[in-house]
Image (cartoon, coloured by chain):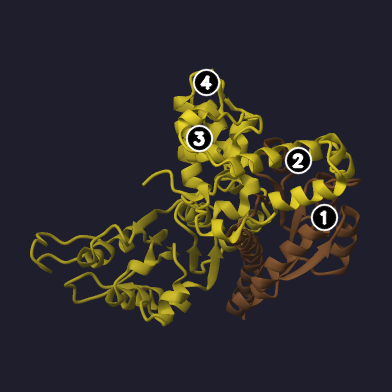
Amino acid sequence: MDEAIRAAQIMVVDDDQDTVAILAHHLRREGFVPIEANSGAQCLKLVHENEVDVILLDLMMPEMDGFEVVKALRDNPETAEIPIIMITARDDLDARAEGMRLGVSDFLAKPVFRRQLAGRVRAQLEVVETARNATAAMDRLEAVKNRSQH
Amino acid sequence: MALQAKFAEAETPFAVERALVGAHPAIVKLRALIERVAPTEVTVLITGESGTGKEVVAQAIHRLSPRSLQPFVPVNCAAIPHDLLESEMFGHERGAFTGAAGSRHGLLATADRGTIFLDEIGEMPTGLQVKLLRVLEDGVVRPVGADRATRVNVRVIAASNVDLGTAVAKGAFREDLFYRLQVVPIVIAPLRERRSDIPLLTEHFLERIRDRTPGREIAISREAMVALWSYDWPGNVRELENMVERLAILCEGSIIDTSILPENLVAGARPATAPIAVKLSDGAVNLNDLVRELEGRLINDALKQAGGNKQAAARLLGLKRTTFSAKLRRCGVIAPASLDDREEDSTSKELYG
């Protein structure tokens, strides 16, 4: 499982290129593969072109803000289950409430602590793995049932 | 017969959605797995942190199985002293050991035709693990001090809050028993990994309180809900459940708000408007930190007002775009490395000791 986590592709979405670069740098150091996006539109485009495991999303973006991106991702069955971690200002209660309402998976408050960044990304990868294991267990159950019937 | 029919009517059908509340894909799939595994006879191994609901899952499997009208016997292997566990589980004959005045049925015999739930199975002594393996393979139980084994028909559901595979690798758990138990492995995600279910669960617990106390109106404020949502819940669903119960007791009106929340829970959800009020008489202050915090807040407010447009936000603060960007960077997306070691996620401390 560790191998799978190391190869995970994490999309970073922020209109500020420096912020994207900094987050990507830290994700790379943790063994993840970052995918960089500078706008909501680019995020929605790249998410279909790559296998994205987790999305780190800044809420404050011009044109299409983070919430619209969350809605668009959640409304599309292909992307509905990708975990989204929103990045908010430490004390931005309104943003957090809105994210909670829209069903984002988790949040990171700025300034982000390195350990927290890696920990929260890993937690989302783990829960995806848990859901995948449930599906695998169902397949296994079918195999056991078939074996006992023959 | 008529009476039986009446009972059957009165009994509400077991709904796994009520027992395992959540809309997160991991929980939706878990419920589907439970419904599929329940009608079969296979052994199940449930892994999940403490408080995630391992016994709830085991009970759900039992109640949805053809054994549902037979006993469900939970055994916590960690709560019973090792030297007593064998006679508790397998029973004993009179005089089998000092103090065994009479013979006694074990819990496996009690669970005959039903389900036995072996919680914290990793704590089971290795000697007993061998005996359990025999139960699973041959369906026989030999009470302590008995010459003959008796047949039992039990479905075994085991649970552990640690990964038993690791215990096997360390030699602390028998590999053969491990593979025999985990025919179908079920993993329950910790609550912090499926944070989006916190509002749903909170509402579910509040509704239960309302049902229990007719006429009681109780709801939660948006700020308090955000605080619950932001917290990491090391004690998982059980801790959240206890917290909602506790808040309902503490709440004097009909709305649970942040004023009655424990300090560590509310820390992550303070309103942005809290003033920065400092007097030198309070002791030494760090002007740089305060300026940085004020800058951070104003930058955030300006960005919000400008709908994320940095040029407009800079104008609102009377700054050049380049100065604004520099300040934005200084307020930083990543905390300085020096702070990293000091950071103990304020939301991750356990509420109960």
The relative height of residue B82 versus residue A113 in the rendered view (above or below) is below
Q: Which residue is mark 4?
A: B214
Q: CA distance from mark 4 to mark 3?
A: 17 Å
Q: CA distance from mark 3 to mark 1?
A: 40 Å
How packed mark 3 is, by other alpha carbons closer than 10 Å (few <14, some 14-19, many 20 or more), is many
Q: Which residue is mark 2?
A: B299
B50 sits left or right of A87 in the view: left
**Nearer to us in this view, B71 or B213:** B213
- Which residue is located at x 76 percent, y 54 percent? A57
From the top left corner, tell me how far across and down residue B79 is, in percent.
Answer: 29, 57
**Nearer to us in this view, A122 or B169:** A122
Q: CA distance from mark 2 to mark 3?
A: 36 Å
Amino acid at the residue labelled 3:
Val
Question: Contact (CB < 8 A) between labels 1 and 4?
Answer: no
Amino acid at the residue labelled 2:
Ile
Asked which quadrant contains residue B296, the reply is top right
